[in-house]
């Protein structure tokens, strides 16, 4: 295994611990206000420093992981499921429906993903759930394309014709032969899409569409430290570093999986 | 004095068992030497070693390759570059893969002249056209400006022959130069290649799995097996009176027009399949030019009786595979009727069509791609049994494996872990599993080694006898057809041009196309199977 992959797995293991058992990593509650230690720089007692209310930034970053990661996971999974369904229908049925769906995908692809996500947020209003919906909607198009291309490729392989001749029913051919053989590149894309979703949902939170205070994910944490960027860099830097590291780790893992 | 002398050459891949285990090969000036053997015997590794083109995973363990007094193994990559194309050149196996698709073919021939400093600019282009003419490319001046995709397979191979001749080499290595071509084209290209090397005094190492080609064209035949030369000598001696048991088996397995039917016919008079006026038109749309219609099969008619084998023969593009797909209803006919046991196939839909498939099964050409790589041989054989609601117990699967002589220990393996012959046995087990009346075999053995091909053909005729099957056997190889067919229908351009009993069509053909196909079959030595 390459060192980059090992490092990525370590980062993701840490993030996974933050999501599942945050209390184990950071014993200080994330919303305990301590006026005695306002805006303290990183120290042994507060490794990521403290914010303007004296809350421990390390604890807030660790506890914020759950919201960030769950929103990104939900968004990527929704993109995968919806995109796979559209791609399957498009690839299997073909004809005018295929043409219609693919033109719709063209339109989606024509806008930058963040812009489409902002448009969806604009319609639905701001909340973590809506952020997930918006990011998911913006990420559907690539899945449609990849699933459709895979289905078109796999269905022409001789073993699909062989299964039909062997009397296998069309639905069973789909479930037993086409979907398993088409899944590889789609799951690889899902991994990359998870990184993109984390970045996009953090961006939306940063812009103020995410969770309401005192709840915070990495995007809102970075955003709330904006006013102190000149004097207390640790408020924005550490949540930002977490987003960057997690996204990089997922992307590096995607590259390792995609390359045979 | 010899031109090329390979001495005790040993090569292995990734430290595995040796691909070449001490090979000696001598080629004299102007001599044609055929190297024959099955896949895995080390033929191609030998060719690559001579050209200094071994893949990175290969390691030379010992021996020498002397050419013109120098050991090529000591030359290194820089030294070999001045040898390749100038002193030794290669005619590769697949003409499509070996040409650069974005460069006109004339420029690809001129490149050889240019890199060896033999000509440049306009002179190189002029010489390239000359070389293409010599290689037998019609209208060479215009063709030189065309791209590989605008030429047929045979024309592409002529371009590669022109490129091989360009440097005026003393030795040409041809690695299965025609195995990707149709038999009639194969004959023309080989005729031309051997004639050119003879007239220019170039030595030729012809690597082939086809004993007929070796017997017809070589002055010296070298037989390889398991990385060793097991026998060599003049073709008349090696192929007519082989010493080594492996050579004897190779000669016995090679089908030829002298071979007889593998088993006495069991054909009855009862008509099982009656095809009339079968036509298939493919409609493709192309941007800008509107719809294009291609007639793949036109007004084809034949009958197959119970227990009978009908062979459909023809070159690629003759419509053979389309007929196979129409017979199992993977495609719907544009016109015409297929009557199976009195019922019209076109009328079947949905569940009725699925139940009909029990009675007509298809064996595909490529055993690797027709099996889903994700399932084990056991699952693959059980699949049709389950689909038709038949007994799919392990006992039944084992029984089918026994019928196709597949060792039951292999049933837990996936297609990627099986050999081509074993995969084809799995595919045949799938085909006979539902107990069909008719088996449509689309070139079932053409992608396999000669010895494996012989085993698969024997398996098919044995199954035909024990199960009372009717077979539609599709092939381009008339020698194979001779071994299995009761009757033959010859297809050309989607039409049946000649049909009749095998003895009559293959012995005294009436149509010129049948005669052309017959004369393209290389003459293997007359030998009864051992």
Image (spheres, coloured by chain):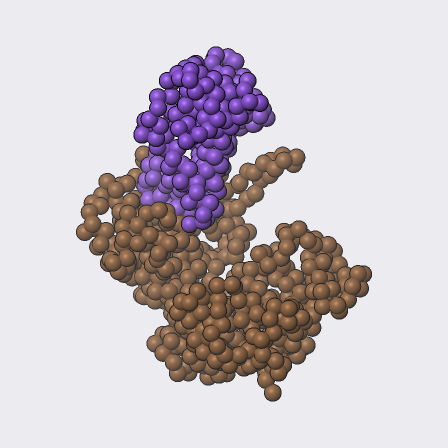
Check the image and report above or below for A201 versus B368. Answer: above
For this orientation, the residue located farthest to the right is B122
- Which chain, by letter, is brown? B
Residue B479 seen: no
Residue B498 as seen in the image, left or right of residue B434: right
Task: Classify the position of the N terminus of chain B by image quarter.
Answer: bottom right
Q: Is residue A194 or residue B518 the one in the foreground?
A: A194
* x and y, in percent, of residue B303 in the image: 39, 51
Q: Which quarter of the picture shows residue A168?
A: top left
Q: Could you tell me if residue B476 is visible in this image?
A: yes
Please tell me which residue lies in front, A67 or A223: A223
Query: Residue B202 location in percent, x, y?
Result: 64, 77
Picture coordinates of residue B491, whole percent (x, y): 50, 54
Q: Which chain is purple in the rendering? A: A
Residue drawn 39% across and 64% down? Answer: B453
Which quadrant is the C terminus of chain B positioned in?
Answer: bottom left
């Amino acid at each position: 295994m390459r060192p980059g992959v090992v490092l990525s797995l370590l980062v993701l293991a840490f993030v996974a611990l933050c999501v599942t058992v945050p209390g184990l990593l950071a014993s200080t509650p994330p919303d305990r206000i301590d006026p005695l230690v306002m805006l303290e720089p990183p120290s042994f007692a507060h490794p990521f420093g403290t914010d303007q209310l004296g809350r421990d930034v390390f604890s807030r970053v660790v506890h914020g992981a759950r919201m960030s990661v769950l929103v990104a996971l939900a968004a990527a999974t929704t993109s995968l499921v919806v995109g796979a369904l559209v791609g399957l229908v498009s690839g299997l049925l073909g004809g005018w429906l295929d043409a219609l769906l693919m033109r719709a995908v063209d339109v989606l692809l024509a806008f930058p993903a963040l812009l489409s996500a902002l448009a969806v947020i604009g319609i639905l209003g701001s909340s973590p759930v809506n952020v997930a919906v918006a990011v998911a909607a913006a990420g559907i198009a690539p899945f449609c394309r990849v699933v459709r291309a895979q289905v078109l490729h796999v269905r022409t392989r001789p073993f699909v014709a062989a299964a039909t001749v062997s009397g296998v029913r069309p639905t069973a051919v789909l479930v037993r032969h086409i979907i398993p053989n088409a899944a590889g590149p789609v799951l690889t894309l899902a991994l990359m899409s998870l990184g993109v979703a984390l970045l996009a949902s953090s961006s939306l939170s940063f812009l103020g569409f995410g969770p309401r205070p005192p709840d915070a994910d990495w995007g809102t944490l970075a955003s709330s430290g904006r006013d102190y960027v000149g004097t207390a860099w640790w408020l924005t830097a550490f949540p930002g570093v977490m987003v960057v590291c997690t996204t990089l780790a997922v992307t590096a893992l995607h590259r390792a999986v995609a390359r045979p | 004095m010899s031109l090329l002398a390979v001495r005790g050459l040993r090569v292995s891949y990734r430290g595995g068992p040796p691909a070449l285990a001490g090979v000696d090969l001598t080629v004299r000036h102007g001599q044609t030497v055929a190297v024959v053997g099955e896949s895995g015997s080390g033929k191609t590794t030998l060719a690559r070693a001579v050209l200094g083109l071994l893949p990175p995973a290969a390691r030379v363990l010992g021996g020498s390759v002397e050419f013109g007094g120098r050991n090529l193994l000591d030359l290194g990559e820089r030294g070999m570059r001045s040898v390749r194309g100038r002193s030794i050149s290669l005619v590769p196996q697949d003409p499509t893969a070996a040409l650069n698709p974005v460069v006109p073919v004339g420029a690809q021939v001129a490149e050889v002249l240019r890199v060896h400093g033999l000509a440049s600019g306009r002179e190189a282009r002029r010489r390239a056209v000359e070389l293409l003419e010599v290689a037998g490319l019609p209208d060479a001046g215009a063709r030189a400006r065309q791209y590989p995709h605008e030429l047929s397979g045979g024309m592409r191979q002529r371009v590669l022959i022109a490129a091989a001749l360009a440097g005026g080499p003393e030795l040409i290595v041809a690695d299965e130069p025609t195995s990707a071509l149709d038999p009639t084209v194969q004959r023309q290209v080989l005729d031309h290649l051997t004639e050119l090397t003879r007239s220019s005094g170039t030595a030729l190492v012809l690597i082939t799995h086809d004993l007929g080609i070796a017997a017809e064209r070589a002055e010296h035949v070298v037989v390889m097996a398991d990385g060793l030369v097991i026998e060599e000598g003049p073709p008349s001696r090696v192929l007519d009176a082989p010493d080594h048991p492996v050579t004897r088996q190779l000669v016995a397995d090679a089908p030829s027009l002298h071979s007889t039917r593998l088993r006495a016919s069991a054909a009855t008079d009862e008509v099982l399949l009656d095809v009339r006026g079968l036509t298939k038109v493919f409609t493709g749309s192309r941007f800008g030019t509107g719809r294009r219609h291609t007639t793949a099969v036109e007004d084809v008619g034949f009958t197959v009786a119970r227990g009978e084998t009908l062979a459909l023969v023809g070159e690629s593009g003759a419509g053979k595979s389309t007929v196979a797909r129409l017979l199992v209803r993977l495609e719907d006919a544009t016109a015409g009727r297929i009557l199976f046991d009195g019922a019209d196939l076109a009328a079947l839909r949905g569940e009725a069509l699925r139940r009909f498939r029990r009675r007509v099964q298809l064996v595909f050409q490529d055993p690797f791609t027709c099996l889903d790589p994700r399932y084990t041989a056991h699952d693959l054989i059980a699949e049709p049994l389950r689909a038709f609601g038949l007994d799919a117990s392990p006992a039944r699967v084992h029984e089918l494996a026994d019928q196709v002589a597949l060792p039951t220990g292999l049933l837990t393996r996936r297609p990627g872990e099986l050999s081509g012959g074993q995969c084809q046995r799995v595919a045949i087990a799938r085909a006979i599993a539902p107990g069909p009346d008719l088996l449509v075999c689309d070139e079932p053995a053409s992608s396999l080694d000669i010895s494996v091909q012989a085993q698969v053909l024997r398996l098919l005729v044995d199954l035909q006898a024990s199960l009372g099957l009717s077979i539609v056997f599709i092939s381009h190889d008339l020698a194979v057809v001779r071994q299995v067919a009761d009757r033959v229908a010859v297809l050309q351009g989607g039409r049946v041009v000649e049909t009749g009993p095998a003895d009559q069509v293959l012995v005294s053909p009436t149509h010129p196309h049948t005669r052309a196909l017959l004369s393209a079959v290389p003459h293997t030595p007359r030998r009864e199977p051992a």
